[in-house]
Amino acid sequence: MAGFEQLKWSVAHDPCSARFRLPQGALPLGASVRIVLRVDENARQAVRKTSLLTGEYDGRAQRLVWREQSMDACGEGYSAVFEPAPNLHAAYYAFSIYTADDLLLHYVPRADGRATFGELVRPGADGEWTEDGWRPASVSDGADVSFGVPDALGGFQVTVFDPAFTTPDWFAGSVMYQVFPDRFARGRGGVREEGVRCHEALGRPVRLHGSWDDPVEWDDVETPDGTAAYDPVDFYGGTLEGIAEKLSYLASLGVETLYLNPVFEARSNHRYDTADYLAIDPLLGTAEDFERLVDAAREQGISIMLDAVLSHTGNDSRYFDAADVYDEPGAAQGPSSRFYSWYDFTPTESGVPYRCWWGHPTLPEVNEHDPSWQSFMLGGHGKQGVLPHWLTRGARGYRLDVADELPDDVLELIRTCVKRTDPEAVVLGEVWEDATTKTSYGSPRTYAFGRSLDCVMNYPMRNALLGFALGSVDALQLATFLKLQQANYPAAMHRCLMNLLSSHDVERVRSVLALGRSLKDEDRAGQLRLTSAITPDQDRKGARLQRLVAALLYAIPGVSCLYYGDESGLQGGGDPFCRQTMPWGDASRAGRSDCGEDLTRFYQDLGQVRKGSPVLRAGQTAYAAPASDVLCVLRWDDRNGEAVLAVANQDEADRPAVVDLAKLDVPLPCALSKTVMTEAVACPVLFDSEAKARPCAPTANLCDGIVHAQAPALSTVIFRIPAGGAQ
C-alpha cells in the first residue's frame, strides 16, 4: 500500500494534451499514436514495470479484447506507440503499473469526470477490471443520469476515422431552426381544407382545430379495436406557405439552416408514419409550394433540411396499404404487390403478423437490404430515387430518423447517394448517445467514422448543459465533457454536431429549467399538471437560465439549433406538449397559459452575433473551469488574430474568473499566450445574456497572457479579445 500512496500524486496522463498524446484528437485510419505516462523522477524507484493496456472490439466475440504492451522509459516517464487495428472504430487504452513491492495498480479515466487526466486506482478497492475495461466502484447500475455527464468508459478513447472524411463548410457552425410544420404558421386557408378532403377520401380521420391557440389533444381515445390509445390526428393547419411567410423572421434570428420535421404525406400530425415519399402532405401544400419555399429561403440565405423516415412506413401507406384503399396493391394485399419484399411478414411475439417498429402495428418496418427498396429510395436502373428527388428540388440535406434502425452498410449507401446527388448536402442522424461509442443490436455503430453520417443530434450536449444550469453538473465536469467530445469526434463531424436544448421528442427547455427537473418519467397527465402549475417566479428563473445556456450553446463549436417557440417562452413536457402551436403576436400570447417570458429579441441579438462572428462559427476552442460554477470557453482564429472568451456563471452570486491562457495546454497564438505589455488591454463585451438587466457592462482585461474577467451571477458574457491587442 505504501507504493500506492507514493505514486498517487506522481503519475499522470491527459489524452487532451500533446505532452501526453500525439497526435491529438481522433486518429486517421492507418496512423499510430504516441502515448506517454508521466512518472515523477523521484517516484520511479517505486515502479518495477509499466504496461499499456489496449482494448479493441472483437466482432466475433462481441466484446473488447484487451492486450498488454510494454512501455519504454523516456524523459517524462514511460511511452509506447499504439497502432490501432486497421478499421474504422473506437479503441481504448489504460495503464498497468507494477510496483517494486509487486502491487498491481491501474491508471484510468477519473470516475468523477472532473478532469481529462486520469487517476491511479487499486483493483478490488477502487473498482474492477472487466472485459469492457475499468469499472469504478462508484458506478451503479440503473442510476438516473438525466442532465448528468455521460458514464465514463473503461479507458481513454482513440477514435479511428476515414482520412477522406469531410463535411460541408456552409453547414458547419451555422444557426439552425427546427420547425414542426403543422404547428408553425398557417398561411392561406384553402390549403388545409383541400388537405382534409384528400385525407378523408383515403379514410383517414382528421380533427382540424378551429383556433390556432387551442391546447393540444393528449388523452387516449377509443380505437377501432375497442382499446384506448393516443392517436395524434388533431391538426392546426400549418402549411409550407405559412413557413415561407415567416422567412424574414427566421433571418432575423440569424438562421441559415431550417430543419423541417416530416413534410411527406402521412396519417398523423407528426408524419413519422410516411404514406407517400414522393408527395407533400396535402395539409401542408404541394410540391410546387415546397419549391417556392426553397427558393424564398435561398433568397434569405437559408437552406432547407428535410426529415427522412426510412426504417418504417405507415401501415396505411401506399406501400403497405393495410386498408386496401390505393389503386395499386400494397404489401398487405400479398406477394403480388411490388412492395411485398420490403416487409417481413413473420408473426411477432406480440401477435402482429409482420415486423414493426418497437411493436407498433401502425409502423411496419422495412427490409433496408431489399434491392427493390434500395432502388426506390436511392435510385438506380434509370430511376432517380426518393432521396435524390427532393435534393434536385432544392433540399440541402436530410436528418435520418431513428438512425439506430438503419444498418451501417445501408447508412453508407444513403450517404453515398446523397453526396453523389449534391456533394454539399448534409446527412444528419438521430442518435441519442455518444455517436463515437454507440452500440446497438450487439455491435458498435460506425456513425462517427466518416462514411455513414456527417453529424448527429447532440443530445449528450443537451444533458450536460441543462445539468450545468440546474447544478447537477459542475463546471469541471462540463469542461471535461466538452474537451472529450472535441477529442473523440473527428474534427469534420465535431464542427457540425447539432447542438440543441429542445426538440419535438423532449421537454421544452423553459419548463425543465423553471421546474428544475426532467419530466421524462411522468405520464402525460403528470407532465401537463406540472407545467401548468409553473409560477411567474419559476418562469423568470427558467428564462434567466435559458439565456445562460443558450448563450453558452452559441459559443460552443457545432451547429446551434433553436427549436421553434423556445424563443417565445413556450412551456411543455414531452410529446405532444412540446409540439404546440407557435404564438404569433401579443394577442395570441395573452390568450394562452403555455407562454412564459418572451426571449425573441434575445435570440435575435444572439443569432446575429453568432452568424456574424467567424471565430464563433469556426474558430479553435479551449475550455477552462476557474471555479466549480464558472465555465470559460475560449475561441480564436489564427488567421486574423480574432479571439473571444465566453464566461458562464451558474451561481447566484457574482464570481471572478481568472484564466491563464498559457496553462490551457493548447497551441495558442503568441498574441494570446504572451504579452510584453505592463498595462492591461480591455476586452469589450460582445454579448451579455443579462445585458438589459445591468446598469453597466461586465469588465474583462488581458495582461501578460492572463484574462481577469467578471462572471456575473446566472449569466453568460462573451468578451471580445482585441486582435493583436496583447502584443
Image (cartoon, helix red, strand yellow):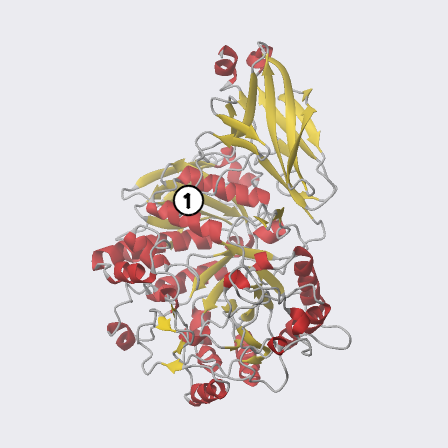
Q: Position of residue 615 (x, y in %)?
A: 52, 53
Q: Position of residue 375 (x, y in %)?
A: 71, 71
Compared with 559, 469 (above or below) is: above
Q: Which residue occupies 68% across, 55% down?
A: 451
- Of residues 693 and 4, the one nearer the viewer is 4
- Which corner quadrant of the image does residue 408 belong to? bottom right
Compared with 278, 14 (above or below) is: above
Dot 1 crowding, Cα within 10 Å, few <14, some 14–19, many 20+: few
Q: Position of residue 152 (x, y in %)?
A: 50, 37
Q: Is residue 313 left or right of residue 706?
A: right
Compared with 228, 692 (above or below) is: above
- Of residues 541 and 376, the one nearer the viewer is 376
Residue at image mark 1: 145
Tag 1: residue type? Answer: Val
Compared with 561, 204 (above or below) is: below
Q: Position of residue 638 (x, y in %)?
A: 59, 47
Q: Which residue occupies 35% across, 65% down?
A: 577
Q: Is residue 82 left or right of residue 317?
A: right
Indicate the secondary structure of the residue bearing disc 1.
loop
